[in-house]
């Protein structure tokens, strides 16, 4: 036997021993036809493949239990649980048409890939297709798409809208709902809202998520995931045109740079909108105008079957002219909708650069993830913002803020082939630097109140912060149907603020205070416990407790109350998740009891010194329902609904009339509808049986928002209202055309009303044309 033959035999034996165990199979439709080029991925691993044109696939795997996700165009995605014992496993997988079966959804809410319906959390996931159907362009469009989720449209600009989940919305310098973009936490209150561009999915986690997400996730989490690079060349181009000068141009492209090794996904969007508001003071009917540019590039490198590297970069630039078109009173805003009285153009500029590197290792005994990120954020008013909301030149304002943040997360977790115990442990470090300056102008007409006007006051500040957290979570299957999850996190954060002030008149700046520095260290312990019981293969019930916190901070220039303490939350919930009728009906029901303690509210104790103070304790309980159904082929019904019963146990606010502090115990939470619902019905009609899958569709949505309070005193509220959205068009494999309308019935509602008032958006309509390959 020649040496060459001996080497060949050794290589064959090595290959045989290395790949002695594998999963292989064939993918077919319910009618028995092969499904070619379907994607097969092993969850929580780097392993996966694409079936050949005959639907055949094979993946080498070791002993253990795994979850496979199988997806193909036109079919409902499927999650298959498999176990390799001592030999290769042969599977025959059947995919159902997505017009008659609901797809199984994979989420990363627990920072591992898992089935939505088998994760004991109150979480809603919206994929790219659903975001398109609901016409979700910004977080403003998320109201009621998940139960207990409400967007406060604060100021007619991209950066001034905030999420309220389960009544957790407060007004301070940090978020109540933490926002993550590709695993990167958005630190600043105004940096978190974003334009949705090239998005793969968004996850909305309800209730405190402090154990895995840390600071400011005390009401919930918005998890935004941009499109991931794949080993397939594809792309799209989309044009949206509508009334009020709406123009939105989006493109996206995905391709392997090195086949089976290095992939790239990139997207770019330009969007704009013309005037909704007019301004009689400036004699213009084009007071406001929005323009934004968004781009992202994601690279994925498969170093080996065990190591991957992901590089993600995202940049957004917003220019919103006519931001904060507020009225001084509720009655003025309602009597003169979309009319503003001011002397300045109220232009707000914002840039946000995010970059991250994720290195992942998938091993036999553990998985490892390292995420390093950097954020550069800048917001400024290039001119002035009218602060008296009237034709008089009384008070105006300008400001700018620059921030840099870096974070480092290190995480170890159980491998993909785990059995009874699944675990995650890790640490999170961050550093933050922020500088800002603001100037308040007491203008010419202010001389009626103060003869020394005009003059201005200037405040400057620098903030440094750094922190570290350690966390861990483990799920143990006590029995094949009963699991217990225990998690905990400990955060330490140190903050320093240096500030000074000055007085300016006639071009002469006079320092009022020299630099003074305040320092404070905050810490928090945020545990979580979940018990879950599998009732059947498609039904589960769970009960949980979770704690969250929002970090404390500083009050600029306030000697009496220079700092305020963290805000805490406790959440108790019971949930049931069910899938019926061969995955044609999904019903999830959650009951929650949410408590806020030491709520941060901007108020005063003496009527002179206003600051953020810990003066509120609020309780809220309610029910949340999510239903998705395919009663007949091509007809899909989605319904979310929730109730909310909020009540302050303590709310100590200053009352100017009595010149004293009053406890408004018993008041309701602000921006928290008592009842909320979104019903969406869509019917598709196939136009041909060609390979292009040409189909017409019509869609209607009814959004009901119950009464909600506009201020803490509960002096003003917005009555319940209903809003109709509609969409219709034609889809195919390579192009879509749709006409749409939002607020079709042109309902008038107060979007914001805490000391100043602003109406919500009027009827918007347009057309969307999409080409894809």
Image (spheres, rainbow, N blue to C red):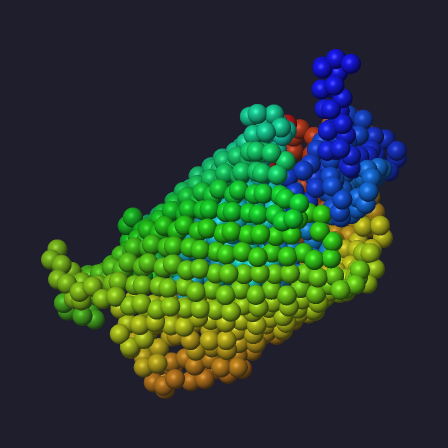
Q: Position of residue 496 (x, y in %)?
A: 31, 63
Can you tell which quarter of the image residue 586 is in? bottom right
Q: Residue at x 54, y 61 (%)?
A: 471
Q: Is residue 442 visible?
A: no
Determine the residue positioned at 64% across, 57% down.
Answer: 423
> Is residue 10 in sight in this rendering?
yes
| Residue in front for this viewpoint, 168 or 209 | 209
Image quadrant in which the C terminus is located = top right
In-image side of 652 versus 96 (left or right):
left
User: Which corner quadrant holds the N terminus?
Assistant: top right
> In terms of image quadrants, where is residue 326?
bottom left
Task: Pinpoint residue 328: horizontal percent, then vertical percent.
Answer: 38, 66
Q: Nearer the viewer, residue 435 or 502?
A: 435
Please count the marks in the image.
0
Compared across the picture, whether 677 is left or right of 250 comes to right
Say which residue appears at 88% left-offset and 35% top-offset: 31
- Image position of 593 with respect to 741: above or below: below
* In the foreground, 369 or 581: 369
Q: Position of residue 106 (x, y in %)?
A: 68, 48
- Against 687, is 130 above or below? below
Report the residue that reaches farthest toward the right.
31
Residue at left offset 63%, top offset 70%: 545
Question: Where is 669 relative to 464, above or below?
Answer: below
Give the left or right position of residue 616, taking residue 86 as reference: left
From the top left corner, tell me how far across and down residue 100 is, in percent.
Answer: 81, 44
């Amino acid at each position: 036997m020649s040496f060459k033959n001996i080497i060949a035999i050794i290589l064959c034996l090595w290959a045989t021993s290395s790949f002695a165990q594998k999963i292989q199979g064939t993918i077919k439709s319910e009618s028995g036809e092969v499904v070619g080029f379907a994607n097969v991925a092993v969850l929580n691993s780097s392993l996966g493949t694409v079936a050949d044109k005959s639907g055949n696939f094979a993946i080498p795997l070791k002993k253990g239990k795994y979850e496979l996700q199988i997806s193909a165009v036109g079919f409902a995605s499927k999650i298959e649980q498999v176990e390799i014992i001592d030999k290769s496993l042969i599977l025959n997988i059947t995919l159902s048409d997505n017009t008659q079966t609901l797809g199984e959804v994979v989420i990363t809410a627990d920072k591992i890939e898992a089935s939505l319906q088998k994760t004991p959390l109150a979480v809603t996931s919206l994929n790219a297709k659903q975001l398109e159907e609901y016409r979700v362009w910004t977080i403003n469009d998320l109201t009621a798409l998940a139960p207990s989720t409400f967007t406060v449209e604060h100021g007619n600009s991209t950066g001034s809208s905030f999420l309220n989940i389960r009544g957790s919305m407060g007004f301070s310098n940090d978020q109540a709902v933490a926002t993550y973009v590709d695993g990167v936490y958005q630190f600043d209150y105004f940096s978190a809202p974003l334009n949705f561009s090239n998005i793969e999915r968004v996850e909305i986690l309800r209730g405190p998520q402090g154990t895995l997400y840390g600071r400011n996730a005390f009401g919930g989490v918005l998890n935004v995931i941009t499109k991931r690079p794949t080993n397939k060349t594809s792309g799209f181009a989309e044009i949206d045109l509508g009334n009020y000068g709406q123009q939105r141009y989006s493109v996206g492209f995905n391709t392997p740079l090195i086949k089976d090794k290095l992939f790239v996904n990139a997207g770019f969007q330009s969007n704009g909108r013309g005037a909704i508001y007019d301004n009689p003071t400036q004699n213009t009917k084009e007071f406001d105008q929005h323009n934004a540019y968004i781009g992202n590039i994601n690279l994925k490198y498969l170093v080996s079957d065990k190591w991957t590297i992901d590089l993600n970069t995202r940049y957004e630039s917003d220019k919103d002219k006519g931001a904060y078109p507020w009225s001084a009173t509720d009655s003025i805003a309602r009597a003169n909708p979309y009319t503003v009285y001011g002397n300045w153009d109220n232009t707000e500029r914002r840039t946000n650069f995010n970059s991250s590197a994720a290195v992942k290792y998938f091993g036999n005994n553990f998985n490892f993830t390292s995420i390093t990120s950097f954020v550069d954020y800048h917001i400024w008013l290039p001119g002035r913002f009218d602060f008296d909301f009237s034709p008089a030149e009384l008070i105006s304002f300008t400001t700018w803020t620059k921030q840099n943040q870096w974070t480092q997360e290190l995480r170890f977790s159980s491998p993909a082939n785990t059995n009874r115990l699944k675990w995650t442990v890790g640490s999170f470090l961050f550093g933050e630097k922020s500088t800002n300056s603001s100037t308040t102008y007491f203008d010419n007409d202010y001389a009626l109140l103060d003869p020394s006007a005009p003059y201005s006051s200037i405040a400057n500040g620098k903030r440094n912060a750094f922190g570290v957290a350690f966390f861990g979570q483990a799920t143990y299957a006590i029995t094949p149907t009963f699991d217990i999850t225990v998690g905990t996190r400990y955060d330490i954060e140190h903050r320093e603020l240096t500030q000074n002030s000055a007085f300016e008149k006639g071009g002469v700046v006079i320092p009022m205070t020299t630099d003074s520095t305040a320092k404070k260290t905050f810490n928090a312990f945020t545990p979580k416990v979940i018990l879950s019981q599998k009732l059947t293969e498609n039904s589960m019930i769970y009960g949980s407790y979770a704690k969250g916190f929002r970090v404390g901070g500083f009050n600029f220039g306030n000697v009496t109350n220079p700092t305020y303490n963290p805000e805490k939350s406790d959440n108790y919930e019971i949930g049931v998740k069910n899938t019926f009728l061969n995955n044609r009906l999904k019903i999830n029901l959650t009951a929650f009891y949410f408590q806020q303690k030491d709520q941060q509210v901007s108020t005063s104790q003496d009527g002179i010194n206003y600051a953020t103070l810990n003066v509120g304790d609020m309780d809220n309980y309610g029910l949340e329902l999510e239903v998705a159904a395919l009663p007949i082929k091509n007809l899909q019904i989605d319904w979310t609904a929730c109730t909310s019963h909020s009540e302050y146990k303590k709310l100590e606010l200053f009352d100017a009339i009595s010149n004293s502090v009053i406890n408004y115990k018993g008041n309701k939470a602000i921006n928290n509808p008592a009842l909320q619902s979104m019903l969406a019905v869509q019917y598709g009609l196939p136009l041909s049986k060609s390979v292009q899958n040409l189909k017409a569709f019509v869609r209607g949505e009814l959004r009901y928002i119950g009464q909600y309070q506009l201020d803490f005193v509960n002096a003003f509220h917005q009555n319940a209202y209903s809003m109709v959205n509609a969409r219709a068009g034609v889809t195919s494999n390579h192009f879509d055309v749709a006409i749409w309308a939002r607020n079709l019935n042109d309902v008038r509602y107060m979007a914001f009303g805490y000391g100043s008032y602003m109406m919500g958006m009027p009827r918007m309509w347009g057309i969307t044309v999409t080409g894809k390959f």
